[in-house]
Image (cartoon, coloured by chain):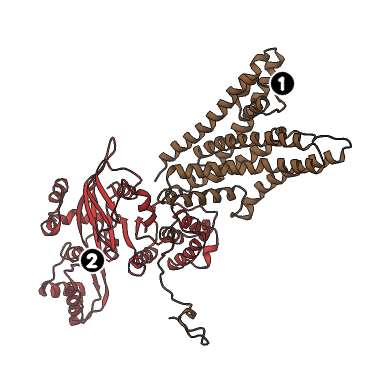
Amino acid sequence: MTVIATESLSKRFPRVTALDRLSLDIGPGVTGLVGANGAGKSTLIKILLGLSPATEGRAAVLGLDVATSGAAIRERVGYMPEHDCLPPDVSATEFVVHMARMSGLPPTAARERTADTLRHVGLYEERYRPIGGYSTGMKQRVKLAQALVHDPQLVLLDEPTNGLDPVGRDEMLGLIRRVHTDFGISVLVTSHLLGELERTCDHVVVIDGGALLRSSSTSDFTQTTTTLAVEVTDSDAHPDGTDALRRALTAAGVSLLGRDGLEADGLPGAGHILLIEATGEETYDVVRDSVAGLGLGLVRMEQRRHHIAEVFRTEGTAETAETVLTGAAQQKGSGRDEH
Amino acid sequence: MSTETGAVTGIDNTRIHNIGYRAYDGPRLGRGYARRSLYSQSLRGSFGLGRSAKSKVLPMLLFGVMCLVALIIVAVAMATPNASKLAIKYTDFAIYLQAVIGLFIASQAPQSVSRDLRFKSVPLYFSRPIERVDYVVAKYAAMASALFILTVTPLLVMYVGALLAKFDFADQTTWFGQGLVSVALLSLLFAGLGLVMAALTPRRGFGVAAVIAVLTISFGAVSTVQAIAWETGSAGAVQWLGLFSPLTLIGGVQSAFLGATSHFPGGEGPGAGAGVVYLIVVLALVAGSYAVLMRRYRRVGL
């Protein structure tokens, strides 16, 4: 089953081309839509909601044509905008009940669904207080709740982690994951941070300049792009633990990134953090065994988040594998991939 | 996780925890229902119902003042011996209390539309089954209904009072009917102008000021210029000057067609010919307000 399908979808404004012959085929699950600001994400969402006609090409959401069945689509789809959209003088309950009725739910059902949905997004007693007094994290939850309250089959989330602190981000991403796993609702979530979506999404679509840059399942992505940062203690036997580990890992055939595997960004502790390319689960085991074998203490081993820019840098190697690239994107890739 | 709370019955519906996510299989009532919901929510909101206690104060106070004045008129009529009609005509009531009506629309029109624009809630509406036309129609109808309730309730009080005072039934009913048509026109016109002003200014304060300027200040200005024209002997200009403020427009229409006393200087309202022009201008303003609102919301879509 296809949730979203577009076929050479284009949207041209007098001065800009927002979407350029974009063909997508998105199935159920959590799909990330990644692109820099102005890449065409918001334009795509507008077209998918049937609010803006495409210049050419076709798009279908849940099997319904966006050009002719806009209202039917909007009844079954939830939308969470990127910007603030909540009036401060009403409580979350009142607001979400109103929005549920705007989606066509009868009054009693609207009230019940609101109570359920607010509980599922993690708002409890505070839901009776005016929204004006909420933290950013709580407001984001209310925005998510109003998108879910009518039990849609698909939600479009536009930058749901914007403005959140790291903990808030993790909670929001966990919540988004649950929207699919627990609620059975498909999700299209946009972001300009690729690393964020890698952990949440089943599938990631990267667009740039309105054209498809890359579309692949997240497991493909992480296997080719994950970077591990490892920091170890020194011991008496190995006064320079980092160096000892580097030699051990090199011997084990693990490839190091950066300058001799050291983080060269001048961040605190940069000289003591090894950057390793993780090719799969086994890399973690190799690191663990090497560290244990040397008798060192493992201070940290974490996945480095990737920025969208890294996709542009690494696509030169990725293009042969699974991606269809546009001519423009190839040029960009070959210009930057010699690191 | 789940706890058996009812050992007596011991069946599944006694579990109160961890019910998980429940899908919704019930009816989805669609666009018409959503439009009606928006209408009733906006109408209730105009009187502060379903909003904070603080926001109920002003509209309820103004509503109370309108009804109180009507009650006083009734009381005076009943206390006056040999009175055969109320001291104030039904059609005059709204003109005398125009400041109260102006305050009501100035405070409630921005509440109704500027709020959605300012806090950018409009995209949430348009991502649902309703279309732009539904939003505009619902908001316009709600504002006009609120004004109609505000202006017709005191007329109703007066009418009931007049009947209780055993005034002539046929006369009172005719005059009440004329008053009804007059406030209906006034509600449509004021709601349109008020909403346009409010929709063009997302900042609430500016919205309030703009509505007062258009409705109340224009009335003062037109009345002054009319008085000057009358004093300087250009009596012919008086009736055409009346076209330039909403309240004198309504006044002109009702003195031409609805048997109302003219409040223009010299007491001469527009005749039937000029009255038609007045009516056309009123209807054009109503249609124009609707068109401007439609345009306005095309731009703020999503």
Q: Nearer the viewer, residue B198 or B21?
A: B21
Residue where numbered disc 1 is placed? B265
Asked if residue B49 lies left or right of residue A72, the reply is: right
Amino acid identity at mark 1 = Pro
Chain A: give its colour: red
Amino acid identity at mark 2 = Gly
Q: Nearer the viewer, residue A47 or A178?
A: A47
Asked if residue B117 lies left or right of residue B107, the reply is: left
- Residue at 42% in and 42% down: B300
The answer for which chain carries disc 2 is A
10 Å crowding of disc 2: few (<14), some (14-19), many (20+): some
The answer for which chain carries disc 1 is B
Looking at the figure, which quarter contains the N terminus of chain B? bottom left
Residue where numbered disc 2 is placed? A271
Q: Is residue B283 above or below residue A326?
A: above
Q: Nearer the viewer, residue A334 or A82?
A: A82
Q: Which chain shows up in brown?
A: B
Q: Is residue B51 above or below residue B286?
A: below
